[in-house]
Image (cartoon, rainbow, N blue to C red):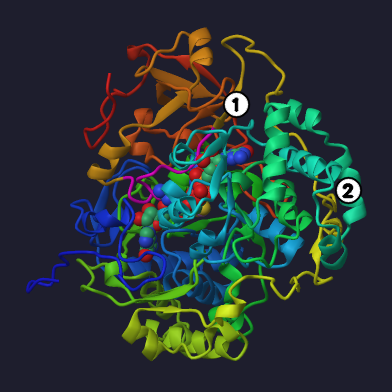
Amino acid sequence: MDESGRAVSVRGRSNHPVTRGWLCAKVNRYLERVYHPERVLYPLRRSGPRGSGQFTRISWDEALAEISERWRQIIDQHGAECILPYSYAGTLGLVQGGVTDARFWNRLGASQLVRSICGYAAEEAVMLTIGGRLAPSPEDVVHSKLILIWGSNPASTAPHVVPFLREAQRKGARVVVIDPIRTLTARSADQHIQPLPGTDAALALSMMHVIVSEGLHNEAWIEQHTVGWEQLRERIMQYPPERGAAITGLARETIVELARAYATTKPAMLRISDGINRHTNGGQTIRALASLPAVLGQYGVRGGGLMYSTSDWLKWDKAALGHAHEESCPPPTRSLNMNRLGAVLTGEADPPVYSLYVYNSNPAASTPNSGKVIEGLLREDLFTVVHDLFETDTARYADIILPATSQLEQVDLHKPYGHLSLQYNTPAIKPLGEARCNWDVMRSLAAAMGFEEPWLQQDAESVIAEVLAATAGKQPTLQGITLERLQAEGSIPLSIPENERVPFQDGVFRTPSQKVEFYSEQAQAKGYDPVPDWVPEVETRPATARIAGKDELLPLLNPAAHHFISSTFANQPTLIAKERTPTLRINPEDAKVRGIRSGQMVKVSNERGWCHLVAEVSEDVRPGVLATTTVWWPKFSPDRRNVNWTTSDRLADFNGGSTFYTNLVSVESVEHNETEDSPHENAVGVFVSR
Ligand SMILES: Nc1nc2c(c(=O)[nH]1)N[C@H]1C(S)=C(S)[C@@H](COP(=O)(O)OP(=O)(O)OC[C@H]3O[C@@H](n4cnc5c(=O)[nH]c(N)nc54)[C@H](O)[C@@H]3O)O[C@H]1N2
Ligand SMILES: Nc1nc2c(c(=O)[nH]1)N[C@H]1C(S)=C(S)[C@@H](COP(=O)(O)OP(=O)(O)OC[C@H]3O[C@@H](n4cnc5c(=O)[nH]c(N)nc54)[C@H](O)[C@@H]3O)O[C@H]1N2
Ligand SMILES: [Mo]
């Protein structure tokens, strides 16, 4: 900070065990975000038609009075569950995320949000199979001899893992990437395997077939630490590598060699993240993948096992977080799935949602089937409040916009999900303009609604102290970690003795049987197949089909862009310039039958909607597979639409998860004058090369 109170630099902590003092491509540009000329600095009220983008400045008192009055009316007429808070990944901190997501809304009796947009199917699959999201910290891959990075793109989405991968490679480890797209991670791997999307469970089961047929499985370990081997084995026998090859589009030999390598190169780490779970068969896919290390007895081995999420090394005390048990809180209300927002707003919810309060989220850009979301946001009888740092596409449809603070302006505590250290966030500068942090707005709204409970009025530090105290007794990983220490040290490793840092090394899993559950009664009780299997995606193109012509529908993968985090950062000119333009990667064969050249505008569409992308004819994808990256702001995209106009709000096989990547589209070339807006320059002026 300089004398005028302006932040002048953002750096990583050099003593952090994983980040080691360097920042990713996005956060490196964090100051541009904080001092972006388009930050919303004052509350605004809509002064033109819905969606027109016309707003007038008002005071916080006016804003709070209007919101509370509208909500009182809605509660009187329809009940509090007609109010829906909508939030997700803006910030994941304890105070500005977790507590903000719970306390005030529990007291109000608003509808609950099923927070399913990201990794819900995978989370449940991992829970059912090994009983908890316990992964080693990324430093541990230096002990691995083989690292399978399966449907995960850490070079872009978790770059701090990469130096450890490099170190492992230097020490002789092989890195194999399994991804339909030649990603940045795939480029630096020792081998890249490109299955067809949504076929990974078949690949895993076929690998197991090879392993079992060749007697490479770990019989003794399986006997001692798993349940349902017999049933899994039966399933495995249905997937000889010929069948696996036919389903995945890979050569039989590729599957056989991969299986042998995985079975004989130990320790072997299997890294997955949430990308691969966003398919209609995502849950069973992750069940199959999480079974692989168990077939070889690789759980509990340093440098081996499954690297998914570290979330369950520490779980906050839920009662302290949300206070749902308090007498003044109405009984729990209905839950609405966030993936279904468009449908919920346009008739699926009964009683209807009459007020939507959005924070930490940009659903008009990031939620599937966005055309439906916009249709909902345009409803005349919907009162929408958006709390954000920017006038996002979502904010454009708001009745009231509230200005939010950045990480530099708010207190918080961050629990890791990729490594094993807690981070305390001390504000570096004062809030800009009249911006307020999420929790402060909750406190203000509580006061405006006449709620006087002290747990709705604590400041952020007291909230943290309360949750730490309530959690400490129950979670040994929090031992010795206090608010004072966090404030003084900034980053503190969880208290895990060195010899316990490898998950499951005591051989005890957190499932009901305390074993790896190949067969899961819990899964069966939920109506799922109790044994992992491959089920074709609901929208799918058969592997054997040859190129059928220009009208054929193709699967469009739409994973994360290197320079954005979902739609966050996607309004910063320097980062947009690096990402260049929303592209469609298409294989030369598919481009040829459609008469598509690189650099040309194409239209992708299906029954849900359409958008325009710029073709990039590329061998990064195999014939029959398309790829784009996300999440572009619609307002900086051709025709104010992004790929989520095509993605589906259908739910995954497990847990109501999202299915962004089960998305068949048709592709056609577009003549310049066919598009509504000029597609060739976006609002920040860096759009598209021609
Ligand atoms: N730069 C950047 N970093 C991010 C984010 C971001 O948007 N940008 N988002 C953050 C968030 S919210 C999340 S959840 C994580 C996500 O982190 P990741 O899971 O690593 O990211 P994704 O890009 O969603 O998906 C990873 C890969 O899965 C592949 N994939 C998709 N479907 C299949 C399939 O059927 N089979 C196989 N084998 N692979 C498949 C995609 O091609 C993609 O390359 O990243 C976080 N970090
Ligand atoms: N097509 C496609 N769509 C996807 C994905 C994909 O792979 N493909 N990935 C999905 C995934 S994994 C996820 S997690 C979701 C994420 O979807 P969202 O949760 O909607 O995340 P963002 O789009 O980044 O929007 C977050 C918003 O929160 C705001 N924000 C940041 N900090 C704060 C704060 O402290 N307070 C308030 N009030 N606001 C804040 C940011 O400015 C931003 O506008 O997107 C999903 N959407
Ligand atoms: Mo996510």
- State yes or no: residue 566 in magenta: yes
Is residue 596 or residue 205 the one in the foreground?
A: 205
Q: Earlier in the sequence, mark 1 or mark 2?
A: 2
- In the rendered image, which quarter contains the C terminus? top left
* Residue lying at 41% horizontally and 26% vertically, measured from the top left: 613
Image location (x, y in percent) of residue 511: 78, 69
Name the dominant secondary structure of the magenta segment: loop
| Magenta stretch bounds | 557-570
* Up-down relation of residue 281 to residue 291 (above or below): above
Q: Which residue is mark 1?
A: 607
Kindly identify the amino acid type of the residue bearing the numbered disc 2: Arg
Write down the quadrant of residue 40 in the picture: bottom left
Report the front residue among 173 and 407: 173
Q: Report x, y in % for residue 436.
A: 30, 70
Q: Is residue 304 left or right of residue 667?
A: right
Residue in view at x 46 percent, y 90 percent: 454
